[in-house]
Amino acid sequence: MTEFTKIRNFCIISHIDHGKSTLADRFLELTQTIPKEKMQPQYLDMMGLEREKGITIKMHPCRMLYQEYILNLIDTPGHIDFSYEISRALAAVEGAILLVDATKGIQAQTLFNLEMAQKQNLKIIGAVNKIDSSSAKVSEAITELSQLLKVPEKEIFAISAKNGTNVRELLRAVVEKIPAPLAPEAPSLPKALIFDSKYDSFFGVIAYVRVFASEIKKGEKIYLMRANSETEAKEIGYFLPELKETQTLKAGEIGYIKTGIKNPGAIKVGETIIKTNGQISKIEPLPEYQEPQSVLFLSLYSKEPEKFSDLKEGLSKLKLNDPALYFESETKYLFGQGFKCGFLGSLHAEITIRRLKEDFDLDIITTYPQVIFKILTKTGKEISIFSPADFPDPSLIEKIKEPWVKLKIITPFSYFNSVFKLIENFKGVLLETNSFGLNKCILIAEAPLKEILVKNFYEKLKNITSGYASFSFENIGCRIADLVKLDVFIAGEKHDVFSKIIDKEDVYSEGKAVVEKLKEILPAQQFSFKIQAGISKRIIASETIQAKRKDVTAPLYGGDVTRKRKLLEIQKRGKKELKKKGKITLSANVYLEMLKG
């Protein structure tokens, strides 16, 4: 037997919080990869945010030795915002364990992950977890999963990752059922796929690779095909899960290469690595990853403008580790220089902002989140709108389109009415309902993406179903929408930083809410001024902040009443003059307070 026949590459996929990281812990213990005295829950979740939130955010590779086999495990996230992490992990393995929580059964992200694994033609092993829970419905979950995978129920493993029940049998099935890597076709020309990377201040870019052919040795010159650049494998090794140096990475293995490249943008995930030997033109690169499409946009600024370069460096390094992150520079008068950023969802945005704060010591200001709108002008030109500041004059607009998504919601029958009303409240349309398993149904609906992402559909769905419902979505293109730009005027001056693109039917409620909130936040001035919200030149909501008033008659003791009137008249004229010339200067704190609302 050649060495690659003793390798098994696999990952664990499931819906969020179904026990992937706990199962990975048991595998690490069984294979004695991590000594018991060093073991801690969610061992592979090394990021502070992962431990704080109790979820996996980044994929985590780890090499384990079991009997005479090398097992390369990749633990993956479960949240829909990090599905791109899962797709990259699936491209580096031959099999996957599909894990289902016995207390909740199959969820929307279970189906989504399974579809991705099946597209890669991976061997799927089904497992039902948390069988030790008092609320577990083990037989029901096994039946659901066996029907989904179209295998006999006896092939579904019933386990407790927490207590280790049947975990050894599951690990044995990984060795027996998941195929070894295919024999390399061209042993003289090593090919490796970069499926992830990170930045090290000393070593530069560290590429996480899956080797598909031949071997890569320390010190060899390697060639990045899509970047059309050459570098050296300064150090290579594998994950234990800490980096462990070795001299050679062979076909079928998963490991890392320290490239020494200090420019984070020089290496992209999906890159093909080969050895430089004069035969480059004869080699086809490995299939590239499909670029993730950002669906949620907001702008990021540092509270300290002088830290703009630090913010740029932080985003560049995060993008190396997170290819789904998009950013480009922009300038706003209130905050100075910053970046327009694109994300895969609200949690993705939240995690990125938290990492910038904690990993790079940056205080961040964010703008309102928004999706991309398409506008067809009367001249026939189509433009993409990423922020309200880009919104053209209404007289130039022929039609506006907004992105829509198809929702797949799995919920117990008892919550059907609540979920149906929620879909309607988010301007969605229910297309069909199908029973699923013994007491669940799948609702297929369509809705505007801005409603789902910006107004946090996920949290509201969880709240009304006590956490039992789940959903996934896919983009289905843009549709014509009746949208307007809501402008905000303070003392007659328009402030685009508070503008929003909203449905025309919502302008009165949104406009009223904005001006009332600003009235609470803005301090009074020496003159009265108005806060107004409107569309085009039409004002639809207005509030007035009265002027500060100093008692100019206080120093007077007695005397004719005309003296008091004269002073009050002078004060009145002064405030009238101030109102004509006065200008409101806003601080960044005002905007931050608005975001809290």
Image: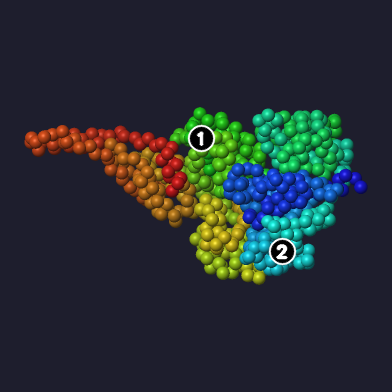
Disc 2 is placed on an element classified as helix
Disc 1 is placed on an element classified as strand
In contact (CB < 8 Å): disc 2 and disc 1: no
Residue drawn at (65%, 57%), measured in percent from left and top? 18
Res. 302 mark: 1
Q: Nearer the viewer, mark 2 or mark 1?
A: 2
- Position of 438 relative to 506 (above/below): below
Comes first in the chain, label 2 or label 1: 2
Q: Amino acid at mark 1?
A: Ser
Residue 370: give x, y in percent of width and height.
52, 47
Work out whether residue 59 can be spotted: no
The image quarter in which residue 217 lies = top right
Nearest the viewer among 247 and 439 is: 247
Residue 409: give x, y in percent of width and height.
60, 61
- Position of 474 relative to 522 (above/below): below
The image quarter in which residue 104 lies = bottom right
Label 2: which residue? 145
Most extreme residue toward the bottom is 438
Residue drawn at (23%, 34%), measured in percent from left and top? 574
Most extreme residue toward the front is 37
Give the tally of numbered discs: 2
Q: Is residue 141 left or right of residue 235?
A: left
Res. 181 mark: none
Q: Is residue 513 left or right of residue 203?
A: left
Color style of the picture: rainbow
Q: Amino acid at mark 2?
A: Leu
Work out whether residue 218 can be spotted: yes
Residue drawn at (49%, 45%), measured in percent from left and top? 368
Residue 300: give x, y in percent of width and height.
53, 39
